[in-house]
Image: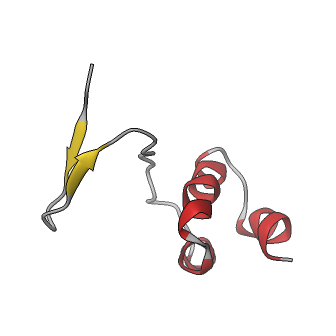
């Protein structure tokens, strides 16, 4: 099955490799790490946050 995404900003494309997570409980520190991450690392970091990693744990693993 082929699937695509369609975003409100007009972007669309193949959704292969996309990750959707609930961010209601993300802290400002988590968002800061997402903002500072490289494009290719954002999905890895978001995946960790989705699986219970803290901002401190992610920062230690990727930014120190």
Q: Residue furthest top?
A: 1
Q: Looking at the picture, does residue 47 appear above or below residue 3?
A: below
The image shows residue 45 at horizontal and vertical percentages of 63, 59
Q: Is residue 40 left or right of residue 52?
A: left
Q: In the rendered image of this protein, does residue 38 appear above or below residue 1? A: below
Q: What residue lies at 45% left-to-right and 45% top-to-bottom?
A: 19
Residue in view at x 45 percent, y 48 percent: 21
Report the quarter where the C terminus lies: bottom right
> Measuring 51% from the left and 61% from the top, which residue is drawn there?
25
Q: Tell me which colouring the rendered structure shows.
A: secondary structure
**Residue drawn at 16 percent across, 68 percent down:** 9
What percent of the width, then of the height, locates residue 20? 41, 46
Q: Nearer the viewer, residue 50 or 38?
A: 38
Residue 40 is situated, as x and y percent measured from the top left of the image, at 57, 61
Question: Is 29 displayed left or right of 1 in the figure?
Answer: right
Quadrant housing residue 4 = top left
Pinpoint residue 16: horizontal percent, then vertical percent: 39, 38
- If the image is split into quadrants, where does the N terminus sit? top left
Q: Eyeballing the image, is 35 above or below 20?
A: below
């Amino acid at each position: 099955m082929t699937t695509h995404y369609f975003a409100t900003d007009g972007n669309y494309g193949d959704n292969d490799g996309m990750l959707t997570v609930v961010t209601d409980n993300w802290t400002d520190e988590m968002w800061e790490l997402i903002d500072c991450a490289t494009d290719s690392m954002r999905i890895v970091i978001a995946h960790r946050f989705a699986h219970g990693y803290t901002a401190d744990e992610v920062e230690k693993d990727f930014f120190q």
